[in-house]
Image (spheres, rainbow, N blue to C red):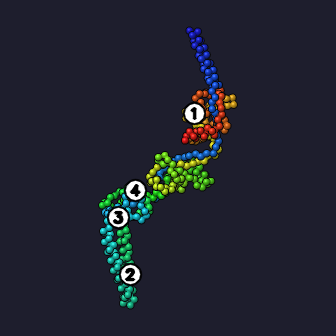
Amino acid sequence: MRRIIGFGILALSILSACESEHSENHHSETVFTATTALRVDTALSKEYVSQIHSIRHIELRALERGYLQHIYVDEGDQVKEGQLLFRIMPNIYKAELEKAKAEAELARIEYENTKSLADRDVVSSAELAMAKARYTKAKAELSLAETHMSFTEIKAPFGGIIDRFHVREGSLIDEGELLSTLSDNSEMWVYFNVPEAEYLDYQERLKEEHILPVQLRMANDRIFQHEGKVSAIEADFDNETGNIPFRATFANPSGLLRHGETGNIIMQDKLESALIIPQKATFEILDKHYVFVIDEEHVVHLRELKVAHELEDLYLISGGLLEGEHILLEGLRKVRNGDHINFELKDPKAVWKELKLYAE
């Protein structure tokens, strides 16, 4: 029995030695590709969920109670400033206006006659003052009737797009009832929330660059053709989220953007002398990033990285790797910690260009 066990141990030892020898021979025959980290000035894109609003978006409401006599536009129409949109049945207001005109004319005649008599000392100055007061009151009532009459016509206070109607012709509407909404989409306000730390970074950069352009990624994942700029920052942080609302303004000459849309604001954060390596030179173990560093003896060593930011196909490194150290680029699954390998060094700029071409 002891002889059988001893023979088994000897066989395992021989097999392990053969595997080790085979692995060394395999590595000695294989030439791996290695590279180094690249230090460059770059920009980091940060995206923020945003809400898109018209620069002017108002509710159109009835100013008087009555029947909706006519609608002069359709939903979705582009209207001009001052264009007539709705008319409320004006019969009562017409009668009130005619009555006020007649009373104003009567008061005017009475005042002029009284003034003529007062000039000849036929009537007292007190009677003249009373006649003038009645004429002034009549003119005020006429002005009020004209104002009420104007309330029967709802006109566009500015150019824009008419939204959905909330009433139909013939409807009995109350004073203040919502008729529709009007949006001026010549420019758009895009609101997004920024964390406190990024707000402080933004303010530092703003001192140097004055204006920081932003881009808008629309819901179809395309970039809006016009750049925007941050035009306002609200006064207070939200204590629950730690964010502060920003507002960016975008020109919208084609009218593509509409009130209520969503998107993502893209802000570029410049990074100077950032250390960059290809993502394919790394691997993960329990949510940690590692590379194989190759020493002067061509021996690979497992090294944990500190990844500051993730870009497309690239990592920005904040620790764990020094500039100029050789790292294994390809064949990561074929080696183990402590293996001796042969390798050829590839220029990191060439590696980066290939990654970008591949990404395109």
Question: Which residue is found at the position 40% from the left and 58% from the top?
Answer: 77
**Circle 3: residue type:** Arg
In the depicted view, which residue is nearer to us: 358 or 252?
358
In the rendered view, tell whether residue 347 sits above or below residue 267: above
Is the N terminus in the top left, top right, bottom left or bottom right quadrant? top right
Task: Kindly state the secondary structure of the residue where label 3 is placed.
Answer: strand
Q: Say the numbered circle drawn on residue 76.
A: 4
Between marks 3 and 4 in the image, the one whose residue lies nearer the viewer:
4
- Badge 2 density bin: few <14, some 14–19, many ≥20, Cα 10 Å: some
**Circle 1: residue type:** Phe
Q: Earlier in the sequence, mark 3 or mark 4?
A: 4
Q: Which residue is mark 2?
A: 132
Disc 3 versus disc 4: distance between alpha carbons? Answer: 18 Å
Asked if disc 2 and disc 3 are in contact, CB closer than 8 Å, the reply is no
In the depicted view, which residue is nearer to us: 269 or 21?
21
In the depicted view, which residue is nearer to us: 266 or 110?
266
